[in-house]
Amino acid sequence: MGKAALILSIIAAGLSLIASAILGSTVGPMEAASGYYFSDLPSWYTGIAVGLFSVQGLCAVLGLTGLVMGIVATATRRGRTQGILAIAIAAFAPVISFALFVILSFALA
C-alpha cells in the first residue's frame, strides 16, 4: 500500500509541477500582450489555460488519494517508509507547484 501511495504522490507532484511551469511561463507574457483580465486573453490560450487548471484539479485528487493512502499505510505498517515519503511529497508538492507558478508568471511578465 505504501508503494501505491508513493507512486500516486509522485505522479501528482510531477504533473502539477509541469502544468504550473507551462502555465506560469506563458501567462505573464500573454497578459502583458493582451490585457490583465482572463477574458481579454485570446480564446485559444484560454482553452489551454482551462485545460492546465483542470490538470491541476486532477493532480489535487491524485495527491489527496496518495496522502490518505500514505497515512493508512503508515498507520497499518504496510509500507511504512514509502507511506511517510508519500505523505511528505503530497504535503509539499502543492506549495512548491504554486510557488513555481507565481515565480514564473511574475518573472516573465
Image (tube, rainbow, N blue to C red):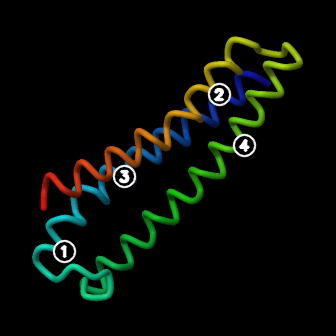
For label 4, the residue is 65
**Mark 2 vs 3, N-terminal side:** 3
Report x, y in % for residue 56.
50, 57
Report x, y in % for residue 62.
65, 46
Residue depicted at x 17% and y 82%: 35
Residues at marks 2 and 4 touching, judged by CB atoms closer than 8 Å: no
Comparing labels 4 and 1, the label whose residue is closer to the camera: 1
Spatial separation of the CA atoms under disc 3 and disc 4: 20 Å
- On screen, residue 25 above or below 78: below
Q: Amino acid at mark 1?
A: Glu
**Mark 3 vs 1, N-terminal side:** 3
Q: Is residue 10 left or right of residue 62?
A: left
Residue depicted at x 46% and y 47%: 16
Q: Report the quarter where the C terminus lies.
A: bottom left
Spatial separation of the CA atoms under disc 2 and disc 1: 36 Å
Q: Amino acid at mark 4?
A: Thr
Q: Secondary structure at mark 4?
A: helix
Q: Is residue 101 left or right of residue 97?
A: left
Q: Amino acid at mark 2?
A: Ile
